[in-house]
Image: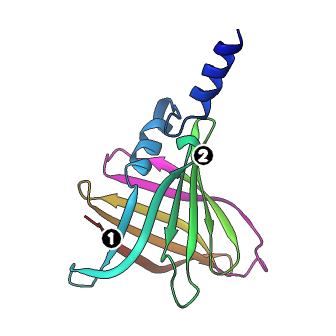
Amino acid sequence: MRNGLLIASVFLLAPGLAVFAGEKAGVMEKLAALEGDWMLLDEDGRETDVVGSTFRLTAGGSAVVETMFPNSSDGHEMVNMYHADGDRVLMTHYCAAGNQPRLVVEATGDDDRLELRFESITNLASPKSAYMSQAVYVFDGDDRLTTTWRSMVDGELTEEKTTIDLKRRK
């Protein structure tokens, strides 16, 4: 009996063994497949020497950590944590602005696209403060990713979009 418990404990704690079911499985697998360093592309689509994002699995493979602009000299490094929550996937964005919006990550009819929509936020200075509220991730094969972000300011969704083009570092 003791050996059986030990084997079960090792299995449950082994990294990368998280199991997901249903629609969230596809979303989490797509995010987990991003593991590695992603380089920023310039406006002409050429790779720069700047790491735009780093993705890695954590918590036994049950969560994905994305560090945006790692070690940036201007203090704008940010972290996104992706994890399953029942039958959905959530992302908490730890923003350089000091707030933490939580977004629901959803599959779309397009296998190369994920949409993130606002659910809630913590540490918002005031209802008029700016925060990230929407994003779209577009996958171009296994080695290209474009993310487009929109913010809320003064309670209104802005027309301005921030687009980040990334290429997997080989």
Residue at (51% x, 84% y) in the render: 72
Point out the residue furthest to the bottom here. 74
Q: CA distance from mark 2 to mark 1?
A: 25 Å
- Using the image, determine if residue 100 lies above or below residue 17: below
- Which quadrant is home to the C terminus? bottom left
Q: Quadrant of residue 44?
A: bottom left
Which quadrant holds the N terminus?
Answer: top right
Residue 87 lies left or right of residue 120; in this view the side is left
Rendering coords of residue 22 (x, y %)? 48, 30
In terms of image quadrants, where is residue 153? bottom right
Instruction: Find disc 2 in the rendering and name its residue.
Output: 59
Residue 118 inside the magenta-drawn segment: yes
Q: Secondary structure at mark 2?
A: helix
Residue 28 vs 43, above or below: the answer is above
| Secondary-structure class at tag 1 | strand
Question: Which residue of the protein is positioned furthest toward the front in this rendering?
Answer: 3
> Which residue corresponds to the image point at 31% horizontal and 82% vertical from the top-left?
49
Q: Is residue 168 left or right of residue 162?
A: left
Residue 141 vs 79, above or below: the answer is above
Amino acid marked by disc 2: Ala
Question: Residue 99 appears at what percent x and percent y?
Answer: 70, 73
First to last magenta residue range: 105-130
Q: Position of residue 89 (x, y in %)?
A: 56, 46
From the image, tell me which residue sits under label 1.
166
Q: Is residue 166 left or right of residue 32?
A: left
Mark positioned earlier in the residue sequence (2 or 1): 2
Question: Please, what is the three-letter code of the amino acid marked with disc 1?
Answer: Leu
Frontmost of labels 2 and 1 is: 2
Q: How is the image coloured?
A: rainbow
Question: Who is closer to the viewer here, 5 or 118?
Answer: 5
Tags 2 and 1 touching, CB below 8 Å: no
